[in-house]
Image: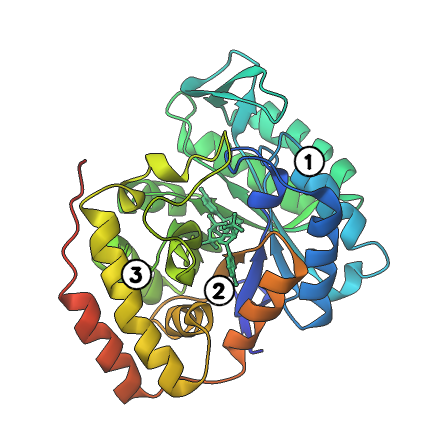
Amino acid sequence: MEYRTLGQSDIKVSELAFGAWAIGGWLWGGADSKDAIKAIETAIDHGMTTIDTAAVYGFGLSEELVGKAIKGKRARVQILTKFGLTWNEKKGEFFFASQDNAGKDVNIYRYSSKEKVISDCDQSLKRLGTDHIDLYQIHWADPTTPVSETMEALGILIKKGKIRAGAVCNYSLELMTEAEKIFAITSNQMPYSMVNRGIGKNIVPHCVEKNIGILAYSPLQRGLLTGKIKQGHKFNDGDTRPTTIYYKEPNLSRILQLTDNLKEIADELKVTLSQLVLNWTIQQPGITCTLAGARNAAQVLDNVKAADFRLTAEEISRINELLSNLKLETKI
Ligand SMILES: NC(=O)c1ccc[n+]([C@@H]2O[C@H](COP(=O)([O-])OP(=O)(O)OC[C@H]3O[C@@H](n4cnc5c(N)ncnc54)[C@H](OP(=O)(O)O)[C@@H]3O)[C@@H](O)[C@H]2O)c1
């Protein structure tokens, strides 16, 4: 496992990080908390020391599970969490309606006023059982609060010693440029996978030029690029994957054909498809850290081996050739 400096901060992140969204259960059709704790412990023990969570994942549950798993290991791990999505508090801009793990209706709002960011940080610290967060990220921009106000809050939290660095997620180039006027953002966390390379156009060149880290999220396209999901896959109730464009036809068939072709390369190299996909991702220009979600120790043990080898330039071009032939519909 390689450890990389995140942007201009002094934070060293593992090139492969543990993504803690699914373990919160919400939007993933539930999750097993015992398996989740074991998964995080396994990740840390195998050098995947960076953990990415968010206040909203399972409405605090993911942060609580991370807090339990890192007990006695805090000095060895880097905790990345997020603020800015609030639930059942009608403030800021309405984002979407959903249901919690118990099936109760929940409304999600984007809200990042200065007071809210500062008070949410205390809540996250409590759930995580720590006195500081390594990287505190706005989850989604709040159109009702000036970007400068949210960034000011991050500066205050750094001064108070509650966070080591502040960052953004899902920020367009325009939003990044606005934020950078008043705050040195450490990174931007963006969707990035073999089948979703949209950030390559303007976010990657900007981040490389300004030495801003990029955290790639959903690199396995939420499980699809592991090769285990086939036509007619049965998802649990509340799992939102089938509603996303990658899991709908005609994209699904095209991606499944791609995974069949990639599997041939993985077999030749004697690695699993997940390892091939994750290794390709960690080697992409500008990508500092690849966030790999997992629900249990077995998935972690598979994923972590993706850092044990390096695809050669020739192998990467072979993969890129397959990707260049993939045409996906962007609206279904
Ligand atoms: N900032 C944001 O807005 C944002 C958005 C999305 C994600 N993220 C972050 O990025 C992280 C990673 O993204 P993600 O969780 O969406 O998706 P992902 O990493 O592409 O996929 C994770 C899912 O794939 C399946 N999986 C993982 N490894 C596997 C293996 N070796 N074999 C078989 N199945 C495996 C598991 O789901 P099943 O077992 O259920 O199939 C797992 O939950 C998140 O956890 C979160 O920390 C951030």
Instruction: Check residue 61 in the rendering and tell me which mark sits there, or answer none.
Output: 1
The CB of the residue at mark 3 lies under 8 Å from ligand 1: no
- Above/below status of 27 relative to 7: above
* Disc 3 to disc 2: CB gap under 8 Å: no
Whole-number angstrom distance, CA of label 1 to CA of label 3? 32 Å
Which amino acid lies under the numbered mark 2 shown in the image of this protein? Answer: Cys
Whole-number angstrom distance, CA of label 2 to CA of label 1? 24 Å
- Callout 1: helix, strand or loop? helix
- The colour scheme used here is rainbow
* Residue 62 x, y percent position in the rendering: 66, 41
Q: Earlier in the sequence, mark 3 or mark 2?
A: 3
Front residue of 8/171: it is 171
Asked whether residue 161 appears in the rendered view, the answer is no
- Callout 3: helix, strand or loop? helix
Mark 2 crowdedness (10 Å alpha carbons): few <14, some 14-19, many ≥20: many
Q: Nearer the viewer, mark 1 or mark 3?
A: 1
**Residue at the spot 52% in from the left edge and 64% down from the top edge:** 6
Provide the residue designation for mark 3. Answer: 204
- Above/below status of 240 relative to 132: above
Mark 1 crowdedness (10 Å alpha carbons): few <14, some 14-19, many ≥20: many
Q: Earlier in the sequence, mark 1 or mark 3?
A: 1
Q: Nearer the viewer, mark 2 or mark 1?
A: 1
**Residue at the spot 35% in from the left edge and 56% down from the top edge:** 192
116 vs 200, left or right, is: right
Instruction: Check residue 289 in the rendering and tell me which mark sits there, or answer none.
Output: 2
* Residue 49 x, y percent position in the rendering: 66, 65
- Callout 2: helix, strand or loop? strand
Which amino acid lies under the numbered mark 3 shown in the image of this protein? Answer: Val
**Residue at the spot 49% in from the left edge and 55% down from the top edge:** 186
Q: Earlier in the sequence, mark 2 or mark 1?
A: 1
* Residue 160 x, y percent position in the rendering: 71, 42
